Amino acid sequence: MDPAGMNIVCIVADDLGWRDLGCYGSSFYETPNIDALARDGTLFTDAYAASPVCSPTRASLITGKYPTRAGITDWIDFRGETHPLRGKVIDTEYQTHLSSQETTLPEVLKEKNYETYHVGKWHLGGEGQKSLPGDHGFDVNIGGCEWGKPNGSNGYFAPWEIETLEESEEDGRYLPDRLSEEASNLIENSLDRNDPFFLHYNPYLVHTPIQAPDETVEKYEKKRQILGLDNVKEFEVGDRMPTEDKKHERIKRRKVQSNPTYAAMVEWLDRSVGRILNSIEKTGQLEDTIVVFTSDNGGLATAEGSPTTNRPLAEGKGWMEEGGNRVPLIIRWPGVTDQSVLASVQRTPVITPDLYPTLLDAANCSLPADQYIDGSDLRPLLSGKTIERDVIFWHYPHYGNQGGTPASAVRTGKWKLIEFFETNRIELYDLESDISETIDRSKDRPKKAEELTNRLHEWQEKVDAAIPERNPEFEPWPDRAAPDQ
């Protein structure tokens, strides 16, 4: 292999929950290719997205920074139709595209002559902002634009109407099928070059709209019947949504994984991954390629049809509870992950910005001198060793479309503390004994709560975190408590 380092394939699913894979405990969804990747690499049980929504996490991966430091703290509302949301407090402002001042992962890799490819979802700005993948270091961009989901008239089915994806007579083809074909072609054509490649593959799955080919959906409709899930109560309905624009809607939590169309989408995600892995093997580059698989936030479990559940984790996308941020992470690094049985399952808490220094390590690249890096290189963990960091943070000063409220959080060891900005309430959880976050320990462990609150506030000040302001026009509606006085 070229001294520049390994080929890199980074696969980022969209809205895929922590329990949405067979290797993470799902018995309804089928993911044989991703499960095989996990057996060959390292599976992280306590991996986290940098945010409970997509754009901040994607910015974090490509910059190595916490979203707050990168300036993108919420999903990018490129049409300006939703923000700011208002409830007891008002959403803070945020950047609506990735700054050109950031030194991105592909830009650093290009210094080592990497070919850099982006395929699929981007959602970090558009052509008008000069913030497409090509503006941030990618040589090739297939399907990346300002959209956060398939916004064409047919959703996932052709014609897709994505400006950066050439279309011919596709006759209703499924978008992930086309994108995985493009990604595989890039891998197979890489043999024509002498330089290593970085493939950033983002298949849009499993984001809404919830759509999949009929024959795959039918498979899971039959499975649902065989498992007796037709007779199971699937949802529980909770309080009204916390924002003024959705106050007539109620939070609808899914209790079981049983949606056939969502299951079909998960299968197509797995097929996409299998196709890419097959191309790596077919071209003889298996031992020269590091593969990372993760998700940009937790599963959609409380709104918008609530197609999945993250249980035993609480809540889901858009929430600061574990279901919003804890995600799958699998890394296969030949020569590293296959050298230590101890590292096959890794329980150390890690977070999205860690991938930036980890992948630069795989490329034998030094960290850029002009870029602040919040992430930690995970290579020691992949070798069965430890890393020095003892704390990770989140800051989401926004209302999630799914019912979550503005909050900040910190985790160290088994302890996680959440600060909710609507009420200034603090909650402390022992995730080792209470992964579902059902017992608030802040009253019986006041010193630990104070310690973590102080660490969180020190970090907020360090990164200049914006704090939501009270909404002076707020009036409570039914099933919502009056604002604190």
Image: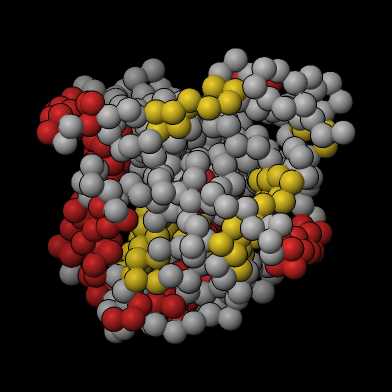
Tell me if 285 is positioned left or right of 390 in this view.
left
Q: Which residue lies furthest to the front in this view?
A: 444
Residue 12 appears in view: no
Q: Is residue 22 above or below residue 268?
A: below
What residue is shown at x 29% (from left), y 76% (from top)?
A: 334
Q: Quadrant of residue 446?
A: bottom right
Q: In this view, does 205 lie above or below 240?
A: below
Q: Which residue lies furthest to the top in this view?
A: 248
Depth order, front residue of 195/221:
221
Position of residue 187 measured from the top left corner of the image (x, y, whole percent): 27, 58
Colouring of the image: secondary structure
Depth order, front residue of 385/191:
385
What residue is shown at x 12% (from left), y 33% (from top)?
A: 226
What residue is shown at x 68% (from left), y 25% (from top)?
A: 480
Q: In which quarter of the image is the N terminus?
A: bottom left
Q: In which quarter of the image is residue 117?
A: bottom left
Q: In which quarter of the image is the C terminus?
A: top right
Position of residue 318 measured from the top left corner of the image (x, y, whole percent): 56, 39
Position of residue 240 measured from the top left corner of the image (x, y, whole percent): 60, 23
Residue 38 appears in view: yes
What residue is shown at x 53% (from left), y 27% (from top)?
A: 238
Q: How many marks?
A: 0
Q: In which quarter of the image is residue 463?
A: bottom right
Position of residue 134 measured from the top left corner of the image (x, y, whole percent): 51, 48
Depth order, front residue of 97/457:
457
Q: Is residue 92 above or below residue 452?
A: above
